[in-house]
């Protein structure tokens, strides 16, 4: 008998984490599980130093001071841990995402701080999805960006329909409802099939539409089925369709047009990964999602300069 994943209401969240001390204990429990270790040298010989509030621990071996933030994406952040935890909660429970303007209002910070905070949380979700997916996959591509008809006259490209002025995103979904997606430079056969080869086991069955970029899948060792959307065909057989990956695109686009309104090409990979990570962990429950996010923070770092330059 399957159990329904735990959903934590905002009221319950504040009952569990009423302030900074509760948040700090939660972060430390997730990182160290009751046995604090030095993030600099790994030593377990650690002393608490109450007088050093930002860095409340000192390693007796390497003599370095540290906190639960050290060596994580939390490092160098001046925001309280309670606000970090609340931001993760908001991004967990908002199925279509949450704009930085709303996050700023909820947390009592500037929009700039909220945007930087959200991008660092997205950074923790990048990676960690390596290895082959299942043996039955749906593959498709989508285009993300502003609609030409909505652009100011001097911004229109006048190059036709479809993906004009947008960024291509390719994605696959397996029979376990796991999704991987990423922005790509183009939708050539080399790019699309290369993505499938990187994520699918040899000999897997791949279902696509009739786009020419997928035609050589069979010659690459895959079993390839297509559905002809142009002829009104969407399900050829109960398992030969691309409805799953198209549902993911629909959610991503609703988040883009209805919540974020704009996803810059530079940061698009983080937004796409945000939606795929939330999709793939939707059955985990609120607290498990937050746990997984905190688990992935170690070893991650993202500065404001990296986000805004280069």
Image (spheres, rainbow, N blue to C red):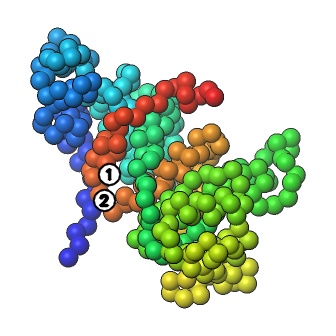
Q: Position of residue 291 (x, y in %)?
A: 28, 47
Q: Residue at coordinates 82% horizontally, 42% vertically from top-left? A: 155
Residue 26 visible somewhere in the drawing = no
Q: Quadrant of residue 310?
A: top right
* 188 left or right, relative to 175: right
Q: Which secondary structure, mark 2?
A: loop
Q: Residue at coordinates 71% horizontally, 54% vertically from top-left? A: 186
Q: Quadrant of residue 279?
A: bottom left
Q: How many residues crowd mark 2 within 10 Å: few (<14), some (14–19), many (20+)?
A: some
Q: Are marks 1 and 2 in contact (CB under 8 Å)?
A: yes
Q: How many labels does the image show?
A: 2
Instruction: In the rendered structure, find residue 289 and report the number of the disc placed on it.
Output: 1
Q: Residue at coordinates 43% horizontally, 55% vertically from top-left? A: 130
Report which residue position mark 2 lands on: 284
Q: Where is residue 101 in the image (x, y as percent from the top left)?
A: 51, 36
Q: Is residue 98 above or below residue 110?
A: below
Disc 1 and disc 2: Cα gap in Å?
Answer: 6 Å
Q: Residue at coordinates 20% horizontally, 34% vertically from top-left? A: 28
- Comparing 285 with 183, the one in front is 183
**Which quadrant of the rendered structure holds the N terminus?**
bottom left
């Amino acid at each position: 008998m399957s159990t329904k994943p735990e959903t934590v209401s905002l009221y319950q969240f504040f009952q569990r984490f009423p302030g900074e001390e509760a948040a700090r204990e939660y972060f430390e429990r997730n990182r160290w599980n009751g046995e604090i270790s030095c993030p600099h040298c790994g030593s377990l010989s650690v002393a608490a130093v109450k007088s050093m509030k930002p860095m409340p621990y000192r390693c007796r071996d390497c003599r370095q001071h540290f906190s639960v933030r050290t060596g994580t994406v939390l490092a160098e952040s001046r925001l309280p841990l309670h606000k970090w935890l609340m931001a993760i909660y908001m991004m967990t429970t908002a199925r279509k995402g949450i704009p930085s303007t709303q996050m700023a209002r909820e947390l009592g910070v500037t929009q700039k701080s909220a945007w930087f905070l959200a991008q660092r949380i997205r950074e923790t979700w990048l990676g960690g999805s390596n290895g082959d997916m299942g043996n039955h996959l749906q593959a498709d591509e989508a285009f993300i960006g502003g609609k030409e008809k909505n652009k100011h006259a001097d911004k229109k490209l006048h190059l036709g329909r479809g993906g004009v002025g947008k960024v291509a995103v390719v994605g696959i979904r397996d029979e376990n409802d796991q999704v991987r997606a990423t922005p790509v430079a183009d939708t050539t056969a080399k790019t699309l099939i290369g993505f499938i080869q990187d994520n699918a086991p040899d000999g897997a069955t791949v279902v696509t539409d009739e786009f020419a970029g997928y035609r050589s899948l069979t010659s690459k060792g895959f079993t390839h089925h297509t559905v002809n959307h142009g002829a009104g065909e969407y399900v050829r057989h109960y398992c030969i369709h691309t409805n799953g990956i198209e549902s993911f695109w629909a959610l991503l686009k609703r988040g883009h047009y209805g919540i974020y309104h704009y996803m810059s090409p530079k940061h698009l990979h983080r937004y796409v990964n945000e939606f795929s990570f939330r999709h793939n962990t939707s059955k985990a429950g609120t607290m498990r999602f937050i746990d997984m996010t905190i688990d992935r923070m170690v070893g991650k770092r993202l500065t404001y300069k990296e986000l805004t330059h280069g």
